[in-house]
Amino acid sequence: MWDKNRLFEVLSSLGVSFSDCIKDRYGKDGFFKPIPANPEESTNFAVRGGLIFFKSEGCETIAIPDVRVDGQKVREMLIKQGHSVLVHLSGEKTATYM
């Protein structure tokens, strides 16, 4: 489940409430904007609690809109934090972790 994700815990420990950063902000991202308005038309996505999840092969992954928090892109924060948590092991391992 998304709220048990280790990356969320790490970001929260840094004072960033990750889900609050993106909750109900998909309207600011051109790709995700139509999904919350018509979730039944988006078979690859689920909308719950103001968040969008991508569905694939029986798994759900939280969708990250292209938004900023305190001037920094949320996507960049996630990539940097994931890379730090993995102690610079490799791009492939970072992508798998994310």
Image (cartoon, rainbow, N blue to C red):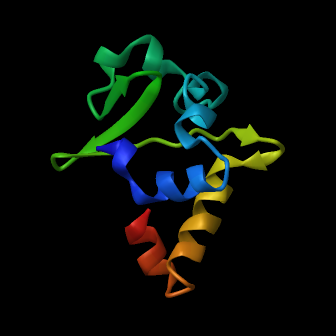
73 to the left or right of 6: right
Vertical comparison of 65 with 23: above or below: below
Estimate the x, y position of residue 31 in percent, counting from the top left. 55, 33
Q: Quadrant of the C terminus?
A: bottom left
Estimate the x, y position of residue 39 in percent, counting from the top left. 35, 18
Residue 68 position by quadrant: top right
Nearer the observer, 30 or 13? 13
Total marks in image: 0
Considering every residue shown, the one lying at the far bottom of the view is 89
Q: Quadrant of the N terminus?
A: top left
Residue 29 position by quadrant: top right
Estimate the x, y position of residue 54 in percent, counting from the top left. 35, 40
Considering every residue shown, the one lying at the far left of the view is 58
Estimate the x, y position of residue 13 in percent, counting from the top left. 59, 55
1 to the left or right of 19: left
Give me the residue at 38% from left, 70% from top: 96
Vertical comparison of 58 with 47: above or below: below
Nearer the observer, 95 or 48? 48
Residue 44 position by quadrant: top left
68 to the left or right of 7: right
Give me the residue at 50% from left, 19% from top: 34
